[in-house]
Each structure stands twice: as C-alpha cells, then as structure tokens.
Amino acid sequence: MSAQDAAKLSFTIDGKEVKAEPGQTILQAAALAGIYIPHLCAMKGLSPWGSCRVCTVLVNGKPQAACTMPVAEGMIVENDTAELKDLRSSIVEMLFVEGNHFCMFCEKSGNCELQAMGYRLGMLQPRHDYMFPTRQVDASHPDVMLDHNRCILCARCIRASKELDGKNVFQFIHRGAHKRIGVDAAGGAGGTNLAVTDKAAEACPVGCIVKKRVGFAVPIGQRLYDTKPIGSHIEAGRAAKE
Amino acid sequence: MANKPKVATCSLAGCFGCHMSLLDIDDRILKLVELVEFDRSPINDIKRIEGRCAIGIIEGGCCTEDNVHVLEHFREHCDVLVSTGDCATMGGIPALRNTIPLRECLEEAYLKGPSVYNPSGRLPGDPEIPLMLDKVYPCHEVVKIDYHLPGCPPSADAIWETLVALLSGKPLSLPYGLIKYD
Ligand code: SF4
Ligand code: SF4
Ligand code: SF4
C-alpha cells in the first residue's frame, strides 16, 4: 500500500468500497469513483449549495445531501435504491409543476439537466397538479435572455457570477413561493454588467438563462441527452479527467 | 375475428400530431389491425364508442366543456386510458393560455387583436360552440388516467411499444430515448 493510499479514508456506496480524501463531499468522492449520484444545484467548480435535495442519499440510514455532506471513514451510503429514486423523482416532478416547462419549444430541450433528470428517473407524469404560475421573461439584455418560467432556483447563476466571474449579477429576491432570481439592476439584466462570456451565462441547468441567437443549433438526435442519460460520463469513469 | 380487443382514439385540445405519430408506425399498422379493431377514432370517423374498448388513446387536454364530455365518455367505455402527448399529459401548447385570464384571451382573439374584423363587437356565444373552460386541464386532472406517454408528439416507436405492452399484458417499460418531453 502506497503512502497516498494509506492517507485515504474508505467508505461504501451501495456496498462498493470507495476511497476518498478527507474534506471531499460524498458527491465528489462518488464521481471520482465512477458512481453517479443525481444532482441539480451542485455544479463542478462552484461551492456546494445543498438546496435541491436531488442528491439525497442515506448515510448510515439517515437522509443527507451528498453534495454538502463530507466523507467519513466507514460511513455506509445508500444511493441507487428504489426508494431514493422515487424521492428524487418526486422532487423533479415538483420542479416541473411549479414552473412552466414547455419542452416542445424550449431552446434548452435535449441539453437541459432538469429534463434529463426526468428521463433518467423515468418520469412520465408529475404526480402533482400543474400550477401554471405567471412568470416574467426578461429580454432586456442584448445577448442573454432570462425566462423565469423555467427557473428552478438552484442558485448556480448566483454562485457562478460571484465565485467565477467576480461580479454580483444575480441574487434571490422575495421568499417562499414568491422566491425569484433577481438581477442587479432595476430595468432587468440589460442594466447589469453581465457579459455573454460570463460563466454565469453558462451555469444555468435549465432554459432560464439562455444566450440569444444560438438556440436550436444542434439537431434533434445529437443533443447532449438524446441518446445517453445524464451522468453517463461519470459512470464511464470520466469525472477524474474533467 | 370476433374477439379482437377494441381500441378507441380521440383528439381533444390537440393538433392531430399525435395521431399522425400513431400512423407513423408505418407497416406495423398492418400488424396492429390484425391485433385490434378500431372503435371510435378520427381515423374511421365513428363518433361514439360502440362497444367496450380495451384501450382508449387520448390526444389533447381539456380546453372546452365538450373535451370533458368526450374524455368522460372514454373513461366510461375503455378499460385503460393512455394520455398520449404533452397536450394530454400537461396541457401542451394550448395551456400557454393558462397564465392569461380567459376574458383577456377572448378579447385579444375577437375584439382587440390587430387583425380582428368583428363589427358586432361581441364575443362568440352560439350554443353550438363548446363553452371554453377557465384554463386548459391535463387529462389526469379531469378523469383517472392509467398510462402517460409524454412527447410532442411521442414517437411512433414509443406509441407502438406502449400498445404492444398493453395488448400483451406485459409491464410497460420504455427504454431510454423513448421517453421525451419535446
Ligand atoms: S428548461 Fe428544461 S424542462 Fe424546462 S422547458 Fe426547457 S427543456 Fe423543458
Ligand atoms: S436562473 Fe438558472 S441558474 Fe439561476 S437559479 Fe434559476 S435555474 Fe438556477
Ligand atoms: S402533444 Fe404535440 S403533437 Fe400531440 S397533439 Fe399536442 S401539440 Fe400536437
């Protein structure tokens, strides 16, 4: 055993032994071990957030968010179980009904992480009634559009703007059912210092923040999740090379 | 053959695209007519379900009173209902009006729209025209639906797989790539 191996701690996910460095989250350690734990608000390169709860796993029998929970020696993690799959699906279903997701004309369709999660989890129909809320579209920016109908409040844009772009373009406004993504200007995104090249313009998992004039460029059949489920690259062991 | 199971189909607030996708199963349609007999369907223009049906395929959601009556008629006469296509499963394109009050929609369409010519200045109110509902409802919010097949439209393969599974009593499990929401 090399010195480096000895420094690693070890725990199990669904009975499989996983080695990890202290300080890693369960989600990070799993990805490096080729195990995909479904997640939406977590994004590589951004600080953990823990709000969407899609990455819920059982740690020694207790539900925990894999994206914020640090690894510990000997912990027993359950990930790929029917019960957790159903719980994750119920979260994804809630996200679908609380917004207005018209995939048939959305430019993110085929490359959308929410949609792909529905596909991966086999969602045919949300179990909840559709809310059809009234939401706004902000087209004030010359190069980027915000369609709040599709926002899932994951805060990836907030974190990307702050942590990667060194700006503060996005923030949450209002509370509870009225919570929205707000921008740092009264007249909409057009009044902010958001640039189309910002990481924040790339970070949105859904079709809320989309770049103008580039939609529908990739034909159906060749889009990111047309033939392979979300998470395939991790399961193929490519997470370490990213 | 006397004992072939019957299949009925209808288009509620839909565009017939899902029916086109059903026809898109190509030569498998010959196999299908060997397996089933079609009862009420836009394909044969029968208007009321004539006998007990094994499967009812519903395209479109409920936008009018008439859509609700047809859907209830199907629920009554079919053992299994399949919501087929995004319009049936989530309202689809017609449900875009759900965030706008009905009166505003009607006024835009019949009174205020830039290309409207309506000297009477009245909204259509003929009893022959089905009354519009306050919003467009996915089918499962109106009656019990047994299976959901999303997509706009669902692919011919997805429809075929579903029909074959239901007719042969096998559990329905669509492979990745056949579940689509677009
Ligand atoms: S954001 Fe994703 S889930 Fe929502 S409409 Fe677009 S493709 Fe569909
Ligand atoms: S705009 Fe996109 S990235 Fe920002 S919170 Fe909404 S879904 Fe997440
Ligand atoms: S789901 Fe799409 S194809 Fe089917 S009826 Fe609705 S609009 Fe037409």
Image (spheres, coloured by chain):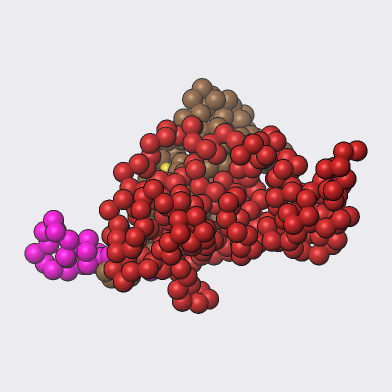
- Quarter location, residue B17: top left
Q: Is residue B129 above or below residue B180?
A: below
Coordinates of residue A148 in the picture (x, y in percent): 41, 62
Residue shown at 74% from the left, 57% from the top: A23
Q: Colour of chain A?
A: red
Residue at the extreme right of the image, as rendered: A1
Label count reads 0
Q: Is-magenta flag for residue B128? A: yes
- Quarter location, residue B106: bottom left
For residue B1, say whether it is visible: yes
Q: Nearer the viewer, residue A1 or A120?
A: A1
Residue at the extreme bottom of the image, as rendered: A175
Q: Is residue A190 above or below residue A13?
A: below
Coordinates of residue B139 in the picture (x, y in percent): 51, 57
Q: Nearer the viewer, residue B97 or B10?
A: B97
Residue shown at 45% from the left, 56% from the top: A165
Q: Which chain: brown?
A: B
Residue A169 vs residue B6: left or right?
left
Residue A94 vs residue A169: left or right?
right
Coordinates of residue A150 in the picture (x, y in percent): 45, 58
Instruction: Classify the position of the N terminus of chain B by image quarter.
Output: top right
Magenta span: B105-134
Residue A157 vs residue A127: left or right?
left
Name the dominant secondary structure of the magenta segment.
loop
For residue B44, say whether it is visible: no
Coordinates of residue A85 in the picture (x, y in percent): 71, 53
Residue at the extreme front of the image, as rendered: A3
Residue shown at 49% from the left, 36% from the top: A223
Q: Nearer the viewer, residue B171 or A216?
A: A216
Residue at the extreme top of the image, as rendered: B27
